[in-house]
Structures are given as C-alpha cells and as structure tokens.
Amino acid sequence: MAPPPKPKLEKTLDRGDLASFLRHLADEAQSGALSFPQGPVPLQGMKALKITVKDTGRALRAKVRIKFPKPGEPDARPDGPDGPGGPGGPQGPTAPDTADAGTAGGETAPARPRYTSLKKRMKRDFKDIGASLAAGFDPKPAVVASFLADSRLMTTYRGKGDASYPDYLAALAAFETAAASGEPEAMVQAYRELAARKKQCHARHA
C-alpha cells in the first residue's frame, strides 16, 4: 500500500511534554512506522523525515513530516538503483569512469564517483544521522553504512586535505564503534567529535 502523499502531523504541546513526545516518536521509529492522522506511515523508502518544534509563546508547536520520492524519482540510497551497488550508481554498469581508473596488466580499476557527488552524498547522510540522534533514536543502519563507506573512499582522493585524513579516520572509527554499540550517548559524543574534525578540515581546505 502506497504511503499517503506528504504525511504531516501537527501538535500543540506544553513545554514539559516535549521530551515525552520525542521519546514516543523514537519508540514508533523503532517499530518502523510513525502514526499520522491518515494512519500509520512506514519509514521504509522515505526520502526525508523532518521534525520541527516552534515556541509560540504560550506553548510549543511540533510538526512531523515525511517526504517520499516522487514517482519515477531514483533512489539514491546505497542499495537503491542510483546507489553505489545499483545499476545506475557510480559503480554500476552504466556509470562513467570518472576518477583514477588506471590499468594494471590490462585490467581496468573500478571507477570512482566524482568528488563533488561523493561529498554531496556524504553531507546528506551526515545531516540525516544528526537529525536522527537529535530526535532521540538510532540513525538508519543503511545511512550509517553509506556514510562510513563514503568517508573512507573520500580519503583516497589526493589533494583534498590529505594531512587531515588520519585525524578524520580516527574520529570515524570511534563513531563506527559507538554506532555498533547502540549506546545513544556514545553515538552523540562520537558524532560531535566527527563533526568537529570535519569542520577543522573544511576550514583548512575549503
């Protein structure tokens, strides 16, 4: 059954109810679906989940929205048709050889995505991970796996901040360990450290 178009939930909260509201969303997310006025909406296949809370003066106004790909829009996730493992992805059969595809003994090395495309995908996934942690629930394993793989791939590009790669990879390994542990506080701390390393690198090599 197709999800309802642009599912949206709006709710007025007392300030003291915000934490319980977010915990409720986290519990529902663990089950794989969120409750909306139109009925339960599965998170699988979503493009974005947006949670906003505004202070209206007298109370808080919370909004939850889920965005799904439009009909015909490619899925850019790792296991989707436009992801690295899909037929239209950067490693699929139709992808051009875009970076350092040298040959050795007549064998062609696997093509790599363009650096700008790789960074754009990393930025999106890093933002999604941060939004999940801020909402109080674990980020999607597929998004974490995509970000980890892309981060390590990024450090193979020369001249893009080579001196900062070792520190970044160390922070990345710490985040991977924290994500595997399933401990929310550890993940948040490791995410913040990774964000700091990323910011330092961008400041030096922007």
Image (cartoon, rainbow, N blue to C red):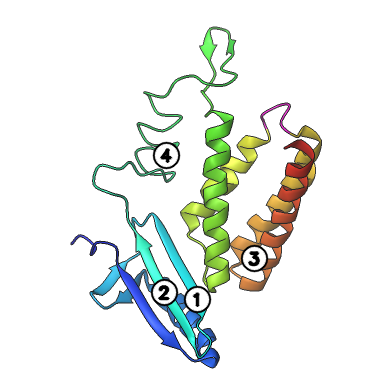
Q: Nearer the viewer, residue 126 or 185?
A: 126
Please tell me which of labels 1 and 4 falls first in the chain.
1
Residue at the spot of label 2: 63
Is residue 165 part of the magenta span, yes or no? Answer: no
Q: Which residue is mark 4?
A: 83
Residue nearer the viewer, 116 or 80? 116
Residue type highlighted by circle 3: Met
Q: Spatial distance from mark 1 to mark 3, Cα to Cα? A: 23 Å
Disc 4 element: loop
Of marks 4 and 2, which one's residue comes earlier in the chain?
2
Reading the chain from its start, which is encountered first: label 4 or label 3? 4
Magenta stretch, residue numbers: 156-160
Tell which tag, 1 or 4, sits nearer the viewer: 1
- The residue under the point 44% across, 65% down is 50
Viewer-side label of 1, 3: 1
19 up-or-down from 121: above or below: below
